[in-house]
Image: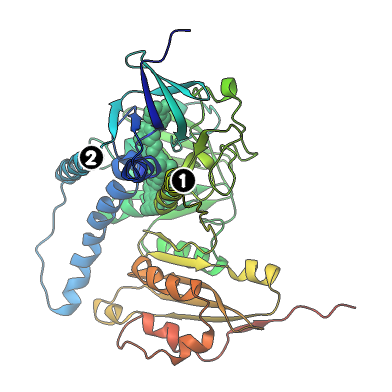
Amino acid sequence: MSAPDRRVDLFVIGAGSGGVRAARIAAGYGARVMVAEEYRVGGTCVIRGCVPKKLLVYASRFGHEFEDAAGFGWSVAAPAFDWASLIANKDREIARLEAAYTATLGKAGVDLVKSRAVLEDAHTVRLEATGERVRAEHVLIATGAVPHLGPAIPGIEHVISSNEALHLEALPTRVLVQGGGYIAVEFASIFAGLGSQVTLVYRGENILRGFDDDVRQHVREEFEKRGVQVITGNTVAAVEPSGRHYTAHLSGGLQVAADTVMFAIGRPPNVRGLGLETVGVRLATNGGIAVDDYSATSVPGIWAVGDVTNRVNLTPVAIREGHAFADTVFGGKPTKVDHASIPTAVFTEPEVGVIGLTEAQARDQIGDVDIYRTRFRPMKATLSGRDTAVLLKLVVDAATDRVVGCHIVGEGAGEMIQLVGIAVRMGATKADFDATMAVHPTAAEELVTMRQPTVRHRREAAE
Ligand SMILES: Cc1cc2nc3c(=O)[nH]c(=O)nc-3n(C[C@H](O)[C@H](O)[C@H](O)COP(=O)(O)OP(=O)(O)OC[C@H]3O[C@@H](n4cnc5c(N)ncnc54)[C@H](O)[C@@H]3O)c2cc1C
């Protein structure tokens, strides 16, 4: 085999959340860094994930705001919505961000190549665009995850993923979304807010598996109040075209008519065709690249961060892992990432913000648990007349009084949980919450004014 064309200290495969951060920090430590990106710089979050989605979320919330304004004395002429303008504006913002990410890498001295990259051996990467081979002391795999449409049911070729949903030519009148995770419910909420008739189909018994049961039920009820039809215990068995529309046949026998059928049923780690088998990089049982606490793979010199490792698939986690990798390998500061108690949000309407243990997890792991829960009509709904409720819930370890979980559904829940998250991670007790003065009038004040437990769970004494 001929000698490699170039030599670097670090070769990063994938310029997404984890790869960009790792490249930039490693270059800051003086490493010669090259990054390969096969699609667009910024990765899933910037190009077809968190950012475009959140822009659509904002758009989707105006409809209700216009309606709610009437109760506060406003008269708003029948508002009109233009999908094409929204998508064009969103695309312009994404292009701006992509350019900013590219510039940041350039300023850091990172060499960016627009190409798919694959491993030839533990220290050689091949750029598919040019055939060039690069020798690297260290290789970081940060290739993310990809949407997966599930089994090849009849008509699967008509089904789109979240990637295409961000680029539809027109707002569909009727949308069927299959899935129960945060991406499925967020898109269901976006389409419903923009005026589509939405059916959400999920195979399990309730949406948002893994979230606290009260949160799952609350979101479902709020969806139903907003006209989203939630069908659980079913899967889409076939998608049949009828004219320019589709009929989705569900496993339980129901038929749903839709202009767009979108599946958001999982995002497997992007490990295919990278040459991992050739090099001997081991996969974990969940399909992600197996790594240790420092993101080292089974092959010395090869590292992996972000969704491709299938640890916690969120942007801030990928960024933290990328940063920790660079500190460990190039900064002389071995750094682990703590994956416990990660605050997270679901940008549905109403929004969800959670951190820590669910009630069921706490009962399982701790045993003696006090639950503080309140559901109330938010003040804004009194004049708007909207039928909606806020849910606030604290899960407290009864032995230590520590707040081990906080679950919020309501306007601004994502913003609230970022701040509550600090207190929870610091080990705040329920007494600390109680001692904090309320901010009045807010919804969040109820977090510090719930005095009596709603439920006290006690582990049964051993025989
Ligand atoms: C619709 C949607 C909404 C989301 N919303 C949120 C949210 O609100 N909050 C949140 O925290 N997270 C959200 N996420 C998850 C978040 O986007 C990911 O966790 C994050 O992007 C993972 O970063 P990463 O660096 O692991 O991979 P990515 O950002 O996916 O980057 C991987 C990059 O590698 C490139 N690549 C892959 N293979 C190769 C190759 N062989 N050669 C060269 N380049 C390659 C890809 O093109 C891609 O650019 C969302 C995801 C989706 C799909």
Q: For this view, does 399 lie left or right of residue 428? A: right
User: Which x, y percent locates residue 400?
Assistant: 63, 83
Q: For this view, does 289 lie left or right of residue 52? A: right
Q: Give above or below for 348 relative to 29.
A: below
Residue 17 visible in the snapshot: yes
Q: CB of residue at label 2: within 8 Å of ligand 1?
A: no
Q: Give above or below for 40 relative to 54.
A: above
What colouring does the structure picture have? rainbow
Q: Amino acid at mark 2?
A: Glu
| Residue at the extreme right | 463
| Residue at x 35%, y 80% (from the top left corner) | 443
Residue 161 visible in the snapshot: no
Q: Nearer the viewer, mark 2 or mark 1?
A: 1
Count neighbours of disc 2 (C-alpha within 10 A) and say few if under 14, some if 14 to 19, many if 20 or more.
Answer: some
- Find numbered disc 1 in the image and state the secondary structure of the residue it sits on: helix
| Residue at the extreme top | 1
Label located before the other in sequence (2 or 1): 2
Count neighbours of disc 1 (C-alpha within 10 A) and say few if under 14, some if 14 to 19, many if 20 or more.
Answer: many
Q: For this view, does 94 lie left or right of residue 271? A: left
User: Which x, y percent locates residue 210?
Assistant: 56, 58
Q: Nearer the viewer, residue 65 or 108?
A: 108
| Residue at x 29%, y 53% (from the top left corner) | 54
| Residue at x 29%, y 49% (from the top left corner) | 51
User: Which x, y percent locates residue 276?
Assistant: 55, 25
Residue under circle 2?
98
Report the Cα–Cα distance between label 2 and label 1: 23 Å
Give residue 120's mark.
none
Residue under circle 1?
325
Q: Nearer the viewer, residue 312 or 347?
A: 312
Q: Amino acid at mark 1?
A: Phe
Q: Give above or below for 35 relative to 413.
A: above
